[in-house]
């Protein structure tokens, strides 16, 4: 943790309504503070440059069993994408599924300082934490997968939201997880019997619970506990033509709930307003009825998001090129595998969930892929309020996170989009609205969708995603002069966002012009919540009873703090 | 091609106890450089960077362009990897044995190895010619581990024997082995031509979906996913002619329901088929 003063830069800090004002940022002992004497700090002159809070990625697959499965099955993804060892940094390899060290370095190189793993199966929590522990520099956390959990399905089937909440509360504590992730609710359980569910009101096998009941139940649990992040949903029917409709209907389910964030000791900050955060919307915004009449379904999603105040989405964009598709939605991956071939892996995770992994390449010459590229951009450009969207590639599903700069360029430059439209399949312009959009995001918008809003959405804006006094001293300086920025020169935009001039983490320069200059250990955030002790006791008795169905002993199930680096519990709902 | 052909001679003098990775030994890199600049080029030994001159005595003269540049290596370099990496023109002659990954991803020019070659010769090559006068080890013209689409053009000619996985994943170009091969010759082949003049062990053409394999010798264990199509007398493929009767098979049906892979096997040498 260091002392740094960043002088004279053009500051973009949307949470504090600062839009390109020339300001000095003072960081002391790793936190943003009021002005202090220059001689006690390293001074960086950022004159003519863009200063933003450190990037926050609220949805990325960077740790755990399926990520590692991707690494193992893709040696070809590793041998040409390498970073050499230095005196302070490890070597690393891998493009779409980089090694843990490389992930930390590449995020830092790009100006990101906080990354959340989007799907941690409870049984794989130990593995996930071990990988996060080995990932340098960035602060992390992970969302726990609940959408097909036996206990959740049982309690919600019985209509017992309190017990479901007590179970979630215990699970988050036991596995040191941050929030609730829900993947293809009800469907993955049926996938254990080679089936799926295809509508919100179709009950699954054995538990006979519907996706609608699970989404509703988990959203209620989420607000009952007052978790920092809302329910994070990977909707049903993902990756199938026409799936935008079920997605819109899913988003409606928690529209009457009130967002509750009850973080102990943190009152006055930019709290989340949403009660549902839709993951990788692009994969859930497919139109048409088959691959033959496939088209963008973005408008249906966007129209709803524009009219609703309880929804945030991340776009999960497709920047073309190699990807590794991985998700807890095993049946979706299997369907894709049957369609395109490639190397496929699938696994069942006992009483909890499942996962699938597939190698994939998005081609400009492919009609469907070209429309997917367009959908990803539409889902930001057509949304009026930037505080409702977040930029991701659902790394590595749409493409690797190192392609964020390309996406920023497409969002900031109509010319960039038009030039790509000329080289990709004509379906992109014929089957989406992308060619008719002339909107170009500015640096303030980009700061919202890459740091301010992800931080706000996951309920961590008291310390991340802004540069107000008390915030973590995570800052990125890009060599971009906003006064001379030319959106037509999009290759320059891409280049500057790819390699930050300075990435500062807790007051320490961690990356400078692409080189790692220090590799501090980041924090792991997880949520601790309190519920009624009697209910928790009953729930634990249920858990012990059904533990006979697990392949491990109950005592070995929870993950203790030794597996975490700089464990940082966030206490919520302490009145119970 | 124009101008004079210039020759740079490399004589191995260094300690090669740990293999040396020498991507720099390529006409594309040498072209237009002075001898001193060539001596200063970086090679890797383990994680350590070294100068080329620590391992080779450098003499002669490089041409202006790659096509005007010939590199001659006088001696065995079987512990030097990646010679001719990504070369697009010119010529490399190795008067001795070569190490692994000779001519990886090359797109043009010519490599001649007078001795034996290591594994992964011509990995993912796109064009040009590689001739090995001796034997070669495994993965000749094969794509990298985990990859399914490799060599797309050019020609590899091994005058001796080759090991396992010859031509794995090739999509174009041709590979000719005058001697025998090990197992999995033409695995995952998706185009191009693989010719084995001698015998093959097992799993010839396993998982192939397109392209052609010709085996003039005996296959010890024939791949089960192939179906007999026809008997042909003499073959003419890519300007190469093969004499005698061949059994034509199609496969691999274990990989696809409608595979386009063609496997020709000598009738005389495989009486059990």
Image: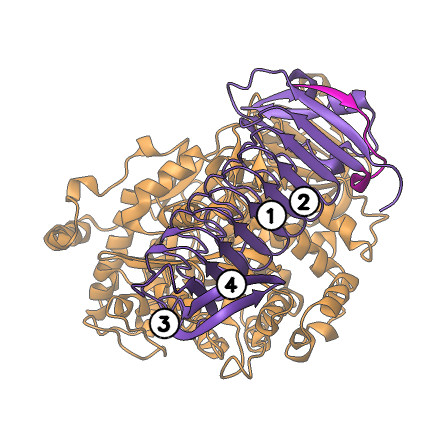
Chain colours: A orange, B purple
Which label sits in the foreground, 1 or 4?
A: 4
How far, Cα to Cα, is label 2 from label 1?
A: 7 Å
Q: Which residue is mark 1?
A: A402
In the structure shown, which secondary structural element does the residue marked by tag 3 occupy? strand
- Give the chain of mark 4: B
Residue found farthest to the right: B3
Kindly check if marks 1 and 4 are in contact, taking CB atoms under 8 A apart as contact.
Answer: no
Label 3 – label 4 distance at C-alpha = 22 Å
> Does the magenta-highlighted stretch encompass residue A143?
no
> Distance between the Cα atoms at labels 1 and 3?
46 Å
Chain under callout 2: A
* B60 drawn magenta: yes
Residue A377 relative to residue A263: left or right: right
Q: B133 left or right of A165? A: right
Vertical comparison of B223 with A493: above or below: below
What segment carries the magenta color?
B56-68
Identify the image quadrant of the N terminus of chain A. top right
At mark 1, the secondary structure is helix
Label 3, label 2: how many angstroms apart (C-alpha)? 52 Å
Q: What secondary structure is marked by label 2?
A: helix
Q: Quadrant of residue A565?
A: top left
- Name the residue that disc number 3 marks: B227
Q: What x and y, as percent, mark residue A367?
A: 61, 74
Q: Which mark is residue B210?
A: none
Q: Nearer the viewer, residue A36 or A406?
A: A406
Q: Is residue A34 above or below residue A128?
A: above
What residue is shown with label 4?
Answer: B243
Q: Give the mark, 3 or 4, whose residue is nearer the N terminus.
A: 3
Q: Nearer the viewer, mark 3 or mark 4?
A: 4
B15 and A26: which one is in front? B15
Pointers 2 and 1 in contact (CB under 8 A)? yes
Looking at the picture, do discs 4 and 2 lie on one chain?
A: no
């Amino acid at each position: 943790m260091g002392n740094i003063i960043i002088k004279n830069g053009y500051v973009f800090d949307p949470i504090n309504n600062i839009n390109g004002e020339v300001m000095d940022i003072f960081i002391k002992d790793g936190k943003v503070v009021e002005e202090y004497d220059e001689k006690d700090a390293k001074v960086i002159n950022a004159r003519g440059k863009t200063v933003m809070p450190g990037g926050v990625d609220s949805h990325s697959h960077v740790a755990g069993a399926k990520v590692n499965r991707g690494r193992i099955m893709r040696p070809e993804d590793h041998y040409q994408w390498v970073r050499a060892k230095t005196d302070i940094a490890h070597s690393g390899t891998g493009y779409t599924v980089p090694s843990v060290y490389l992930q930390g370095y590449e995020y830092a190189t790009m100006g990101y300082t906080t990354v959340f793993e989007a799907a941690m199966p409870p049984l794989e929590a130990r593995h996930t934490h071990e990988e996060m522990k080995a990932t340098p520099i960035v602060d992390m956390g992970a969302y726990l997968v609940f959408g097909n959990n036996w206990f959740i399905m049982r309690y919600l089937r019985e209509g017992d939201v309190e017990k479901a909440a007590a179970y979630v509360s215990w699970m988050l504590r036991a596995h040191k997880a941050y929030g609730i992730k829900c993947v293809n609710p009800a469907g993955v359980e049926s996938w254990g019997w080679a089936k799926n569910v295809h509508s919100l009101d179709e009950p699954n096998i054995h538990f006979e619970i519907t996706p609608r009941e699970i989404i509703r139940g988990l959203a209620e649990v989420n607000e009952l506990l007052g978790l920092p992040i809302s329910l994070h949903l990977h909707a049903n029917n993902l990756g199938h033509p026409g799936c935008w409709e079920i997605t819109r209907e899913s988003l409606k389910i928690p529209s009457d709930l009130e967002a509750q964030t009850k973080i102990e000791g943190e009152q006055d900050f930019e709290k989340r307003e949403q009660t549902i955060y839709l993951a990788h919307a692009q994969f859930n915004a497919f139109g048409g009825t088959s691959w033959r009449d496939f088209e963008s379904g973005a408008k249906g999603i966007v129209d709803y998001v524009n009219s609703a105040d309880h929804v945030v989405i991340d776009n999960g964009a497709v920047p073309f090129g190699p990807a590794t598709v991985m998700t807890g939605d095993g049946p979706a991956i299997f369907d894709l595998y049957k369609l395109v071939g490639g190397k496929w892996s699938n696994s069942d995770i006992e009483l909890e969930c499942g996962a699938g992994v597939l190698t994939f390449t998005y081609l400009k010459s492919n009609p469907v892929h070209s429309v997917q590229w367009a959908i990803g951009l539409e889902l930001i450009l057509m949304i009026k309020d930037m505080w409702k969207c977040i930029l991701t590639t659902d790394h590595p599903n749409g493409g690797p996170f190192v392609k964020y700069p390309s996406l920023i360029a497409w969002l900031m430059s109509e010319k960039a989009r038009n030039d790509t439209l000329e080289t990709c399949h004509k379906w992109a312009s014929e089957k989406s609205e992308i060619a008719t959009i002339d909107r170009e995001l500015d640096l303030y918008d980009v700061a919202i969708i890459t740091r301010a809003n992800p931080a706000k959405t996951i309920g961590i804006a008291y310390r991340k995603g802004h540069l107000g006094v008390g915030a973590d001293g995570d800052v990125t300086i890009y060599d971009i002069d906003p006064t001379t920025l030319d959106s037509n020169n999009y290759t320059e935009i891409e280049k500057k966002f790819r390699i930050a001039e300075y990435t500062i983490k807790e007051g320490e320069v961690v990356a400078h012009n692409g080189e790692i200059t220090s590799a501090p250990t980041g924090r792991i955030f997880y949520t601790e919540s309190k519920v009624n002790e009697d209910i928790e006791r009953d729930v634990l008795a249920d858990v012990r009873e059904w533990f006979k169905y697990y392949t491990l002993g109950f005592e070995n199930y929870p993950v203790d703090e030794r597996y975490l680096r700089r464990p940082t519990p966030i206490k919520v709902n302490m009145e119970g | 091609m124009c101008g004079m052909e210039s020759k740079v001679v490399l004589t191995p003098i260094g300690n090669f106890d740990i293999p040396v990775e020498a991507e720099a030994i390529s006409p594309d890199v040498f072209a237009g450089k002075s001898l001193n600049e060539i001596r200063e080029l970086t090679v890797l030994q383990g994680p350590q960077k070294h100068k080329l001159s620590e391992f080779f005595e450098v003499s002669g003269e490089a041409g202006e362009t790659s096509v005007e540049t010939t590199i001659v290596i006088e001696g065995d370099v079987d512990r030097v990897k990646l010679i001719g990496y990504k070369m697009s023109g010119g010529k490399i002659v190795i008067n001795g044995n070569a190490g692994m990954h000779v001519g990886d991803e090359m797109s043009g020019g010519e490599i001649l190895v007078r001795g034996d070659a290591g594994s992964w010769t011509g990995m993912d090559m796109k064009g040009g010619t590689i001739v090995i006068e001796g034997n070669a080890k495994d993965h000749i013209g094969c794509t990298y581990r985990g990859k399914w689409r490799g060599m797309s053009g050019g020609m590899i000619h091994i005058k001796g024997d080759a090991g396992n996985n010859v031509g794995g994943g090739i999509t174009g170009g041709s590979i000719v082995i005058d001697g025998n091969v090990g197992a999995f010759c033409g695995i995952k082949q998706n185009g191009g031509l693989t010719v084995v003049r001698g015998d093959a062990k097992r799993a010839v053409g396993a998982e192939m979906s397109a392209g052609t394999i010709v085996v003039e010798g005996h296959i010890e264990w024939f791949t089960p996913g192939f179906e007999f199509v026809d008997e042909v007398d003499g073959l003419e493929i890519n300007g190469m002619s093969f004499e005698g009767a061949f059994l034509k098979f199609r496969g691999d049906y274990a990989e696809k329901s409608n595979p386009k892979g063609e496997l020709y096997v000598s009738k005389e040498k495989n009486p059990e088929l």
